[in-house]
Image: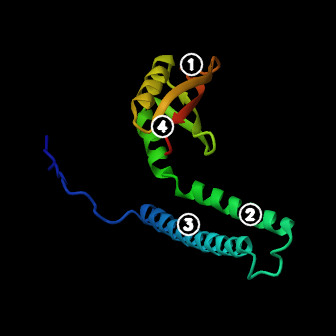
């Protein structure tokens, strides 16, 4: 019986993965667009605040005498400030915390942050009820969140593994 030679190759192919590079380029483009939009909104807010200050001082604008125009300008400034508040929240920290606490037994399906109430609704699917309860405990242990409430859960009886579909409501500690 002839013995064949066995060749072992311990080196990996170090060629770049094109899908990963394309995803990186896409993420950088999205980041650049977000920063540009943020700077544009910031400039608009500064301009509107300057116009509002001129109106309040009673000179500089022709419409200073009409209260309807003042109210409209004040509403525009408030809307712009709300957009800025949402853009300046640490979304990355929030998403990273929710995902890292999930582990392998939790599949996240949706995140619905409510900026005004400082809560985030988390929808997902857990391997079993114990995994869901462990996830809630891990979220409450994070410094980002306060109490975490289980809004609803449902065991998927049609699935042979019987996963648990759930919705949680997690409160941000302080201002995130």
What label does residue 74 carry, if any?
Answer: 2
Q: Which numbered disc, 1 or 4, marks the residue that appears first in the sequence? A: 1
Q: Secondary structure at mark 2?
A: helix
Left or right: 17 in relation to 91: left
Q: Secondary structure at mark 3?
A: helix
Mark 1, other Cα within 10 Å: few <14 / some 14–19 / many ≥20: some
Q: Nearer the viewer, residue 5 or 138?
A: 138
Q: Which residue is mark 3?
A: 34
Q: Which numbered disc, 4 or 2, marks the residue that appears first in the sequence? A: 2
Q: Is residue 45 above or below residue 163?
A: below
Q: Is residue 13 above or below residue 62?
A: above
Q: Residue at x 58, y 70 (%)?
A: 42
- Quarter placement of the N terminus: top left
Q: Which residue is mark 1?
A: 162
User: How far is disc 2 from disc 1 in space, using C-alphas?
Assistant: 53 Å
User: How far is disc 3 from disc 1 in space, using C-alphas?
Assistant: 41 Å
Could you say where residue 87 lies in the image, as x and y percent from the top left? 56, 58
Q: Residue at x 61, y 72 (%)?
A: 46
Instruction: Please state which of the two labelled residues, at mark 2 or mark 3, is closer to the viewer.
Output: 2
Could you say where residue 92 lies in the image, as x and y percent from the top left? 47, 51
Hey, which quadrant is residue 63 in on the image? Answer: bottom right
User: How far is disc 2 from disc 3 in space, using C-alphas?
Assistant: 25 Å
Q: Nearer the viewer, residue 111 or 21?
A: 111
């Amino acid at each position: 019986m002839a013995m064949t030679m066995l060749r072992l190759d311990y080196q990996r192919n170090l060629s770049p993965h094109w899908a990963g590079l394309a995803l990186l380029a896409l993420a950088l483009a999205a980041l650049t667009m977000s920063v540009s939009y943020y700077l544009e909104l910031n400039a608009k807010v500064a301009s509107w605040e300057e116009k509002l200050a001129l109106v309040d001082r009673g000179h500089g604008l022709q419409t200073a005498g009409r209260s309807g125009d003042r109210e409209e300008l004040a509403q525009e400034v408030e809307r712009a400030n709300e957009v800025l508040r949402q853009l300046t929240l640490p979304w990355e920290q929030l998403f990273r915390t929710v995902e890292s606490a999930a582990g392998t037994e939790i599949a996240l399906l949706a995140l619905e942050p409510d900026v005004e109430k400082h809560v985030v609704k988390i929808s997902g699917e857990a391997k079993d009820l114990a995994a869901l309860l462990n996830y809630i405990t891990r979220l409450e242990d994070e410094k980002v969140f306060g109490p975490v409430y289980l809004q609803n859960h449902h065991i998927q009886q049609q699935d042979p593994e019987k996963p648990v579909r759930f919705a949680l409501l997690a409160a941000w500690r302080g201002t995130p």
